[in-house]
Image (cartoon, rainbow, N blue to C red):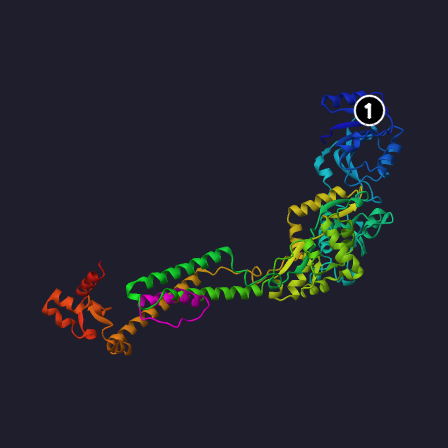
Amino acid sequence: RNVLSVTYYSCRSDSHKLTREFNKENVPVIVLTNTEVRPVLLTSKNGVIVDLSCDFVPDLLDFSLQNYLFREIISWIFIGEDGTTNYELLIESFIPISSEVVIFTPIFNDPTSSWNIFSIYKVTEKSEMNFTPILYTSEDNVVSLTSLYETTKRKNLNGSKIRATIAFHYPHRLTKYDDLRMNYIDTATKTTYQFLMNLATDLNFTYDLTQTDSYGFLKNGSFTGLMGHLERKEIEVGIASSFLRKDRLPIVEYISESFIIRSPLIFRQPSLASVSNIYALPFGLSVWVSLIALIVILILAQILLIAMPIMRNEASLLDSFSIVLSAVSQQGFSRDSFRFSWRILHFITFLSFYFLFSSYSANIVALLQSPSNALKTISDVTHSNLKVQVQNKEYNPVLYEESTDPAVIELFLKKIKPFGAKGYEDAEVGVKNILTGRFAYQIEAHTAYKIISNTYTESEKCGLKEIESVKIPRHSIPIVRNSSYRSIFRERLMWQRETGHFDVNIKRWNFKSFHCAAGSPGTLIEPPCGFCGGARGLLRKHLTNAIQSELEWHFHFLFGGTHAQKKARQGGAEEMYMVHDSHSISTLIIVPSEWNIKADIENLRGENARKDVEGGIGGGASQEDVLEIMGIYLHI
């Protein structure tokens, strides 16, 4: 048994012999000749040996039964002859099933012969004593030996009835204990009921069951409800998930944690537009830096283009600012140019601000539909214009009144207590009030999730906020203090947890959090890479169209277009040349008339070149000739 010490109740003169044998094994022995109980016996794993021939045995048995000394941490050995008065008194006593009690009796009441060893216990107080042989010698001298482990691991209560009470907060809404259609009503009790019904099947017993509508709290010096039944020892076990509370420890013990309950404060966050300037929210620091950098780059590009000699008569310095300003404000520009570089720059400028304006508009639309994150703590809710209601559970008023958190106390005194009974509401009504945006409602999380999933639309599920308010104590299964079934129930419930039975039942009854179909409310999701490819394709298409339009304009200008004719009629201001390279690619070059490129080409190439340049616009010249002359004029 691996005991730390042994207490030997003896009235024999030769008790020192037994003491000497234990000392050889380094086990200390205390020899007592009366019913004295040493404190060490109650605080650690110890053994007790009792000689049934002593006169004080009846008093010792009575004292041990009243003080629940027949329990698993104390191993008892009784030594005596069958049929004696003390032996019969022991057999009539209630030796609990969780105890470790062994009796040694000599065969044929002859101490010099062999001994029979039995493990004894009773399933209930009124049942017969069970004898499990450990070492037994039959009349024909056949010796039977049973493992000591098998005699203590008892798993059969022989169909006995154990008194129990089940507690429901809402008995008027009860259909059946295992009705999954109402799994959000009294979920903790229904889950615990499944655990304990499995326990009854495992250990072969049934319940003598009663029902109450209260878990029970201390009022006027005594407990009500389920705890009152346990306090008066009317039942052995409570079929409920009970709070681990200090005031309950003198009357109950807890054998297994059963169900974890969260009871958050749920409310709808106010809209972002009501607490912030949504038109300024998209402009973060990085956006401002990027926007200013884009404007500066575009203005510099305009200035550099205007500074070129070919553009001196096309636009002024102020035009560059006007063009960028008109692009920022999504307006057009009155002036236009047939310069290819000028048109491309304008196109990029307006396209950039078009995308910027579109992104800003989409962001504003998203922000208009987004909730804020203004209410983050209990204090924020207390000082907001939200009304607060609490699920009408028996424990909620008690937990609020006992809370030591200053924020929770302030919430209770300002938002709940002044309204009395109106501050407590049924789950369905409270969850419906959340939807209005004017109420915060504290409710058990699994109940709220089930009702919200059944009654809210997908868009209404987004934007809900949870804040933990009162701390819900741990839940466990209560059993009467010093119960004879405590250790065996605890062991088998632990077996259920280790084998997964607990998890299966909890998943069956506990409803998990709902999911917002739109993802996180109010967030802009980064577009996938496919969108980027589409944007690049769209930009490529627009650039292709722009280049094609520009080439068509040039073609129209060179071959009889109105603009070409107008330029030709101006005369003297500018001269235009169509030059050709070695690949037969034509290029239009416009130069000031005072350059007199015709004469320079004649001097450079001779008479054969005169035929190519005559005719002005309609004439042609080689690209090398014209570029060489232009380089001379430009001092290149």
Task: Determine whether 435 is above or below 223 in the image.
Answer: below
Instruction: Please state the horizontal and vertical placement of residue 363, each as a whole percent of the image.
Output: 52, 63
Examine the structure image and report whether residue 201 is included in the region drawn in magenta: no
- Front residue of 416 and 250: 416
- Front residue of 466 and 90: 466
- Front residue of 573 and 440: 573
What amino acid does circle 1 point to?
Answer: Val
Residue at image coords 78%, 23% = 18
Total marks drawn?
A: 1
Quadrant assignment, res 273: bottom right
- Can residue 139 be seen by looking at this rendering? no
Instruction: Please state the horizontal and vertical placement of residue 600, each as a whole percent of the image.
Output: 15, 66
Quadrant where the C terminus sits is bottom left
Instruction: Please state the horizontal and vertical placement of residue 162, each as a whole percent of the image.
Output: 80, 49
- What residue is disc 1 on? 31
Quadrant assignment, res 33: top right
Task: Determine whether 287 is above or below 489 in the image.
Answer: below
Residue at image coords 41%, 59% = 296
Q: Main secondary structure of the magenta part?
A: helix
Q: Which residues are magenta?
A: 319-347
Examine the structure image and report whether residue 328 is included in the region drawn in magenta: yes
Is disc 1 surrounded by few (<14), some (14 to 19) or many (20+) residues within 10 Å?
some
Residue at image coords 79%, 42% = 484
Task: Determine whether 66 is above or below 79 in the image.
Answer: below
- Can residue 141 be seen by looking at this rendering? yes
Instruction: Please state the horizontal and vertical placement of residue 314, each as a whole percent of the image.
Output: 32, 68
The secondary structure type at the circle numbered 1 is: strand
